[in-house]
Amino acid sequence: MSRWYVYLARCADDSLYCGIALDVAERVAAHNAGTGAKYTAPRRPIHVLLVRRCADKGLALRLEYAIKQLNRPQKEALVAAPAGLEAIARRLRRERFGMQKSHRRV
């Protein structure tokens, strides 16, 4: 099973970019070469701030989506306290396996 990673990076214009990759170093090199995402090409170089390993691509995609839904101060808070990212990942895993509090059997 391949391991996927979610990463949060700061672009040269100080914007934040979130993505997923099997190899973060390779993906960042692609971004910095201008061959990565369309968003990062004019905003390079980018610098990785945060990386989280995920068990599968599905979790990586859900975590990436959850991060992209956050506003900038919330993303900056994740960088300052990465435990927040772990909390989001735990919530996503619980939701994935139907273990939400309101749906548990007694």
Image (spheres, rainbow, N blue to C red):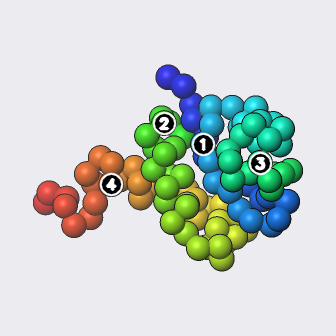
Image mark for residue 8: none
**Which element is circle 4 on?**
helix
Q: From the viewer's perspective, is the residue at label 2 or at label 4 nearer? A: 2
Q: Earlier in the sequence, mark 1 or mark 2?
A: 1
Disc 2 residue type (three-letter): Lys
Residue of label 3: 41
Q: Residues within 10 Å of mark 3 (few under 14, many from 20)?
A: some
| 104 lies left or right of 93 | left
Q: Residues within 10 Å of mark 2 (few under 14, many from 20)?
A: some
Up-down relation of residue 3 to residue 81 (above or below): above
Residue of label 4: 95
Disc 4 residue type (three-letter): Glu
Q: CA distance from mark 2 to mark 4?
A: 16 Å
Give the image location of residue 93, x and y in percent.
40, 49
Up-down relation of residue 26 to residue 9 (above or below): above
Q: CA distance from mark 4 to mark 3?
A: 34 Å
Residue of label 1: 20
> Do labels 1 and 2 touch, CB within 8 Å?
yes
Work out whether residue 104 or residue 63 is closer to the camera in this orientation and state it.
63
Give the image location of residue 6, x and y in percent.
61, 46
**Which element is circle 2 on?**
helix
Instruction: Find the residue positioned furthest to the bottom.
Output: 73
